[in-house]
Amino acid sequence: MKVVGDSGDGRVDDYPVLVSGDRVTVHGYTITVVTTMPHTTITITQNFIPPGVGFF
C-alpha cells in the first residue's frame, strides 16, 4: 500500500505505508502484507462483526 505526496517541486513521490509483515484493520477488514519480493502479495480478510453491531 502506498500513499502519494506532492513535495512541491512538481513531482509526485510515493511512500510505502505497509511493509512485509505489517497489517492494518479498516472498516471490518484486515489487510496484511505477506511479501514484497519479487512482487507485493497481500491478504484481505473480513473480520467477524457480531449481529447488531455495525457502522452507521
Image: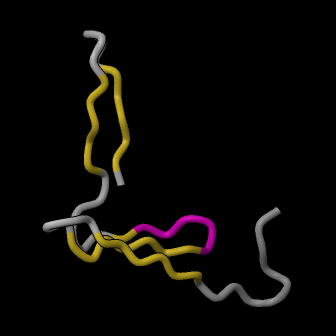
Question: Which residue is at a point 58% across and 81% down the rendered structure image?
Answer: 46
Residue 48: x %, y % from top left: 64, 88
Q: Is residue 41 left or right of residue 56?
A: left
Q: Quadrant of the C terminus?
A: bottom right
Give the residue furthest to the top: 9
Front residue of 54/42: it is 42
Question: Which residue is at a point 62% across and 66% down the rendered structure image?
Answer: 27
Residue 25: x %, y % from top left: 49, 70
Dominant SS of magenta comes to strand
Residue 33: x %, y % from top left: 31, 71
Q: Is residue 49 left or right of residue 34?
A: right
Give the residue furthest to the front: 38
Instruction: Give the magenta-colored segment's residue range.
Output: 24-28
Q: Quadrant of the N terminus?
A: bottom left
Front residue of 56/17: it is 17
Q: Quadrant of residue 18?
A: bottom left
- Above or below 7: residue 3: below
Question: Which residue is at a point 25% across and 10% down the rendered structure image?
Answer: 9
- Above or below 14: residue 56: below
Q: Quadrant of residue 43?
A: bottom left
